[in-house]
Structures are given as C-alpha cells and as structure tokens.
Amino acid sequence: KNEVEQSPQNLTAQEGEFITINCSYSVGISALHWLQQHPGGGIVSLFMLSSGKKKHGRLIATINIQEKHSSLHITASHPRDSAVYICAARKSSGDKLTFGTGTRLAVRP
Amino acid sequence: NAGVMQNPRHLVRRRGQEARLRCSPMKGHSHVYWYRQLPEEGLKFMVYLQKENIIDESGMPKERFSAEFPKEGPSILRIQQVVRGDSAAYFCASSPRRNDQPQHFGDGTRLSIL
C-alpha cells in the first residue's frame, strides 16, 4: 500500500463545477504539498500546508492532521484547470517528499 | 527573476552512453532536490543536496547514478552507461531553506534512451 493515496485517479467535470480531490497518507508528516502538472509536463507548487486551510484564488487546500487527510478544492472550474494534481507528503523524520500517483482532471467547456 | 532552470529540456542517448542533466536553482536557493518520473508513473524522490553536500541520496540507484551541487555552478545529475529503463522525466526543485518553504520545480529534462 502506498504511503500517499489519492482519489479519484481520473476526474471529468463540466466548466463551472466545484471539484474536490482527496489525499490520504499513512505516515507522520511535517507538511503536505499540492502540485499541478500540466500536459507539457512542468510542475507548479500550489500549496504547502501543515494545518488548517489555505486559499489562493479559486483553489482551496485543507488538511486534517488527526484523520491524515487533505483535500484540494477548485471552485468555478475552468478548462484551463485541466491538469494532473499531485499531493506529496514530507515525513516528520526527513526532508524528501513522497508523492501520490496524481489525479488527472479534465474540465470540459 | 528566473525560476529553476533545467537543461537540456530533451536529451537522447544511446544505450551505454552517459547522460548529464543540469539544474540551476532559483537565486538565493541553496537546497536542491532531484526527482524522477517514469512513464505512466508518479514522481519519486532521488536525492537531496545542499551546496557541496549530499544530504539524502536514499532514492538514487546505487550504481551508475551520481549527483553533485558544487560551490559554483549548477547541480548535475549524472547517469553513466544508460539503459532503456532510465528513460524518464527528471525534475529538479529548489528551496531557500530546509523544509519550511515550498519547493520550486523546473520544467524537467526528458531523457530518451535509444
């Protein structure tokens, strides 16, 4: 079993829909990252959080440390949000990131 | 204000050749991380370096792979005697300090082995 699990693996939405991507982890962490990878392959860091909630534009990330669960929400989704969203956990014991397998999101106009 | 720069973007090598991948971190960043993304797989940590030091190389294969981050110049990931299984996208990320900042990623180097 992977230490970081994401769901769903694939997600198709209509433009304007509210989207939720989930991430569960089984290890103690010091931080949880959300990343976005576009079809061209480049990776953008969206959030790094260790507690609570962060918001940037239409993106919201939350984390529940007790339940070892994080969610990424996209409000008023747009076709340009189509990408692979990856969560990554930094274990309490070290520096390296352990990645989920990603959620491939397609937003249709 | 350049981001993390990786070059080359695409690299083609024949089996048995050497591959050198370069990563220039963002200005002011002294921590560099290398990750590998195999086709249809997720990202995997390879190595974490600070200037002139390897901090954690637990994700790097013991043979043929090496990494350095010299006092001057970019970080280099070197793969000797490449094999088909080395075909992947290699990403570099940097951060200004240990752990308390998000990592900034480069666009990656796509390595293809013929």
Image (spheres, rainbow, N blue to C red):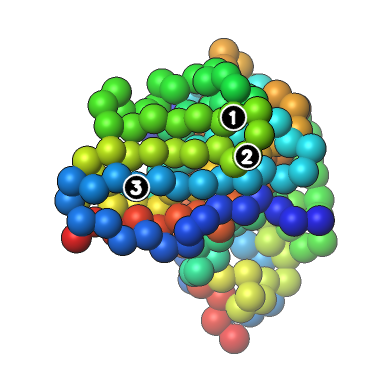
| Numbered badge on residue B19 | 3
Q: Which sits in the foreground, B26 or B69?
A: B69
Q: Amino acid at mark 3?
A: Ala
Q: Amino acid at mark 2?
A: Gly
Residue denoted by label 2 = B73
Label 2 near label 3: C-beta < 8 Å? no
In percent of width and height, residue B24 lies at 63, 46
Q: Is A104 positioned to the left or the right of B17 in the image?
A: right
Closer to viewer: mark 3 or mark 2: 2
Q: Is A10 positioned to the left or the right of A60 in the image?
A: left
Considering only vertical position in the picture, is A74 above or below B70? below
Label 2 near label 1: C-beta < 8 Å? yes
Q: What kind of element bears circle 2?
A: loop
Q: Amino acid at mark 1?
A: Pro
Q: What kind of element bears circle 1?
A: loop
Q: Is A33 positioned to the left or the right of A8 in the image?
A: right
Q: Classify 10 Å Cα crowding around label 1: few (below 14), some (14-19), many (20 and above).
A: some
In percent of width and height, residue A50 lies at 72, 29
In percent of width and height, residue B92 lies at 54, 44
Q: What kind of element bears circle 3?
A: strand
In percent of width and height, residue B98 lies at 70, 24
* Distance in Å between CA atoms under marks 3 and 2: 18 Å
Q: Residue at x 31, y 28 (%)?
A: B61
Residue denoted by label 1 = B70
